[in-house]
Image (cartoon, rainbow, N blue to C red):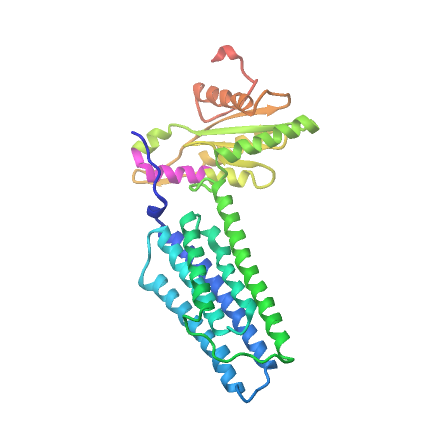
Amino acid sequence: MKMTKEPVSRKKINTTQLTEWNRTVFNLFWKIWLVILFVQLFLFIFFEATPECSRAQYFKQFILIPSGLELMVLLGCQLIFTKLYRPRLRRTVSLYTIFLITAFAGITICVHTSVNMLQALLLVPMMLTPLYKDRLMTLVQAVFVIILYILSDFYFIPNASYILPDNDFSPYVELSIFIGATIATFFILERVYSTIMVNEDRSKHDSLTHLYNHESFYEELDYYRNRFEKKGKAFSVIIADIDNFKKVNDTYGHAFGDEVIRKVGKIFMESSKNDGFAARYGGEEFAMILPHMNPMAVAEKIRSDFESFGFETSEGNRRFTLSLGAAVYDKAYKSASIFFEEADNALYHAKRTGKNKVVLSGSYDAEDE
């Protein structure tokens, strides 16, 4: 049966992802709101009253109204999307984020119409679009900011009726706004970069065990091969396979099988803390790269630790075993996969000769197979 790729518009977001997204987005917008409020209060300190505008009028027009509106939008969105409504589609989540940041930008520029440079802040929402991972959402955000610019430029939406006079106070306005915009942009870019880095890191790991995945393992194996070719530093590889794992699944169910896999993953992770690189190579197969030529002690400890662990089942306490194969990279190989076969053959030999053991490549005769 031919598999079809799920359209972006139908991609769903689970509860954990939604909670993380809300925490990320609202944490960012609270920071932006505080930066805007700080800039407004800073300008208020230096503002000198005029016949056209008292300090009370200035405070209401340029601090109370914009900060209040932004606060209402922020609290309203946070209440709706964390308590009252939990969207399930990724595009829905992206759309309410677009609405939130566009509203922030729109309120700011419509209140401070006397500052020419402020309309450039409409470009700031575009910086969040990499988080959406959706070309259409980037286009939607672009359309939103263009429409907002047109509305503000032609005064189709409410705007400040008071124009700040050109006096000693003027330089503080644009300087403060520029510094505030720079800080807000920094917060946005910091969030975008950190989110991208987290996603890249997750793509390199197995979701069940949190070990590195198959692709990451081969990338690391290539690194060690290249290091051997340049510096002559040998290394070793261990492969492990859970014995009779199909029987474990058939007897106790796949959920229990996942627990067994997690346990092996935990042992591998603990064993690789100091100097190893551990990965979940396949379904019930695990692999580790060690930057030295002595894999047997590590492999034996992994085997022993797993064998000694008791799993609680409906039939009482049960123990399971691992078979492991190891190989040392102390000579040149044409490719990483060819070398990997050395450890794989050792694992196969361990399986064929009784299981629950560690076999080093080259420690047995080929005829034994």
**Relative to residue 256, is residue 244 depicted above or below?**
above
**Residue 257 lies within the magenta run:** yes
**Relative to residue 336, is residue 168 depicted above or below?**
below
Q: Is residue 293 at all visible to an observer of this figure?
A: no
Furthest residue toward bottom: 51
Q: Is residue 239 at all visible to an observer of this figure?
A: yes
Residue at (61, 79) in percent of width and height? 166
Can you give x and y, in whole percent of width and height, for residue 182 in the image?
Answer: 58, 63
**Dividing the picture into quarters, in which one does residue 150 lie?**
bottom left
Magenta residues: mostly which secondary structure?
A: helix
**Relative to residue 110, is residue 202 depicted above or below?**
above
Residue at (61, 28) in percent of width and height? 225
Residue at (45, 77) in percent of width and height? 65
Furthest residue toward front: 154
Furthest residue toward top: 367
Q: Which of 138 and 362 is in front in this view?
A: 138
Q: In which quarter of the image is the N terminus?
A: top left
Can you give x and y, in whole percent of width and height, for residue 169 in the image?
Answer: 62, 79
Furthest residue toward right: 231
The span shown in magenta is 251-264
In-image side of 144 versus 85 (left or right): right
